[in-house]
Amino acid sequence: MKNLIYDLKINKNLKDDELIELLETDIYDDKLHMAADEIRRMNYKDEVYIRGLIEFTNYCKNDCYYCGIRKSNIKSERYRLSKKDILKCCENGYKLGYRTFVLQGGEDPYYTDDLICEIVSEINKSYSDCAITLSIGEKSFESYKRYFDSGARRFLLRHETADDEHYSKLHPDSMSLDNRKRCLFDLKKIGYQVGSGFMVGSPYQTTQNLVADLRFLQELKPDMIGIGPYINHKDTPFSGKENGTLELTLKLVSILRLMFPYALIPSTTALGTISPLGRELGLKSGANVVMPNLSPVETRKKYDLYENKICTGEEAAECRGCLERRVEIAGYRIVTNIGDVKKHA
Ligand code: SAM
Ligand code: FES
């Protein structure tokens, strides 16, 4: 029998039917995770990069069917952080050793391009040894370019699913996969380190869809790849749909590590939410980044993309300490440098 894991490790690729076999059977899992860990250690040793996540607005003009902060969720208690609030989060984070700040939010027109540029350049001026990452959704080439010129160097935008039909089951007609992809290629053209990714186990997802996701990532060649299980939110049209599983998410983390040895792959909060040791297992399966929360405690619960999100009650310093211990127990080590991607193979 063909050794799928060996082939994936050596060739960084498999045929579609082989990927499907790997995804649909669990007999390979242990060996797959071990191979992924070996490759992550070859590229990144035992180092885990930390990113300070600032969830600065939960207003959103979009209406993604899976998302708890979609505009039609009238139960969502909305909030926005001021420039001063955001800078305070950075100040706090800097003292705790963070050298990357990730500004994430819904697509909120209140934050005009001028305001985003002002915020980015102030962070840049005050913390010139830090990287600024934006995760604020779909914008025009010109807007992305302005943020870049103000000092943003990284951008996270998950493609969510690379299959048109599946995309249309997760989003209203006003959104399109074509535009999402256009954004990602624009970001690359401008010179950002780009992160993409998808939810695992989102409603109507098939194994073929996952293979399409991997193929799209091969085409995009992102620097960062973020995946996490889909988790239900009761105040969305998908209320009551099943969550993605820990096992399939871990399997995909390992496959991604073997296909993209250089990539920055976070062990996500969603993984930690579906299982108490999810983030540790994510690291052991090939992930090499964690993104603790730097948002003010008062607003954390309100950024509820899905139910039972973890780490919503702790201060930034507690989150930092907790993660440090968890990472160590898992057999890795948090490093506080800027944490750029290693050169693409
Ligand atoms: N607005 C920005 C964007 O569209 O990229 C950033 C914020 S958006 C809430 C960040 C990510 O949360 C999405 O890319 C999506 O994959 C994830 N997300 C949203 N709802 C989710 C859910 N119910 N379960 C798991 N992940 C979810
Ligand atoms: Fe916009 Fe979720 S619908 S962030």
Image (cartoon, rainbow, N blue to C red):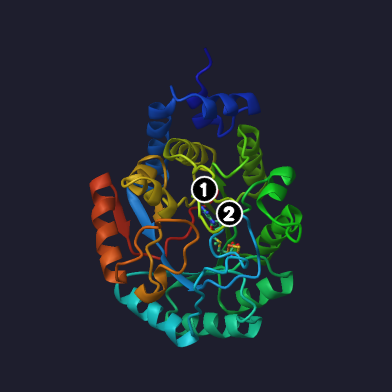
Amino acid beneath label 1: Tyr
Neighbours of disc 1 within 10 Å: few (<14), some (14-19), many (20+):
many
| Picture quarter with the C terminus | top right
Q: Which residue is mark 1?
A: 230
Does residue 132 appear to the left or right of 274 in the view shown? right
Q: Secondary structure at mark 1?
A: loop
| Residue in the image at 72% along x and 53% along y | 177
Q: Give percent across and percent down for residue 124.
A: 49, 80
Q: Give percent across and percent down for residue 116.
A: 58, 80
Give the vertical position of 344 relative to 305 (above or below): above
Residue 345 in sight here: no
| Ligand 1 position by quadrant | bottom right
Q: Which mark is residue 66?
A: 2
Amino acid beneath label 2: Tyr
| Residue in the image at 29% along x and 48% along y | 332
Q: Residue 207's quadrant in the figure? A: top right
Camera-nearest residue between 205 and 115: 205
Camera-nearest residue between 181 and 313: 313
Question: Ligand 1 within 8 A of label 1's CB?
Answer: yes
Question: Ligand 1 within 8 A of label 2's CB?
Answer: yes
Camera-nearest residue between 76 and 121: 76
Neighbours of disc 2 within 10 Å: few (<14), some (14-19), many (20+):
many
Q: Give percent across and percent down for residue 163.
A: 70, 43
Give the vertical position of 72 relative to 221 (above or below): below
Asked if the residue under mark 2 is in contact with the one under mark 1, i.e. CB atoms within 8 Å, the reply is yes
Q: Give percent across and percent down for residue 55.
A: 47, 70
